[in-house]
Amino acid sequence: MVAENYKGARNDAVLGPVMKLLDSSRLSMDDHRELFLNAGYQDVEIYEERRRGWICAMGRKVHS
């Protein structure tokens, strides 16, 4: 998963109000991690490229 807009990003002061006007949900890095864990993913890692305001979340889903 790649997110170009998330709560706490470098450009949050500019994009935050715009996204609120659009009624868009904005998740923090911790929110993304929690969603992955609740969906059954393990070894969840969140990487941030702060200069560009991007995050990348990766996890592993074990199938039984």
Image (cartoon, rainbow, N blue to C red):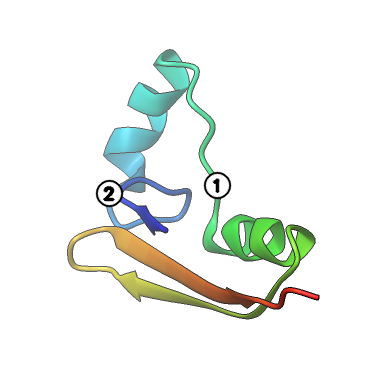
> In which quadrant of the rendered view does residue 42 lie?
bottom right
Residue lying furthest bottom in this view? 43
Q: CA distance from mark 2 to mark 1?
A: 14 Å
Name the residue beneath numbered marker 1.
Answer: 27
Residue placed at 54% from the left, 31% from the top? 25
* Camera-side residue of 47 and 58: 58
**Residue 23 at x, y = what percent?**
50, 17
Vertical order, 18 against 5 (above or below): above
Mark 1: few/some/many CA within 10 Å (<14, 14-19, 20+): some
**Residue 9 at x, y = what percent?**
37, 56
* Camera-side residue of 43 and 19: 43
Residue placed at 35% from the left, 45% from the top? 5
Q: Amino acid at mark 2?
A: Asn
Name the residue beneath numbered marker 2.
Answer: 11
Label 1: which secondary element:
loop
- On the rendered structure, is 42 left or right of 4? right
Vertical order, 25 against 13 (above or below): above
Number of the front mark, 2 or 1? 1
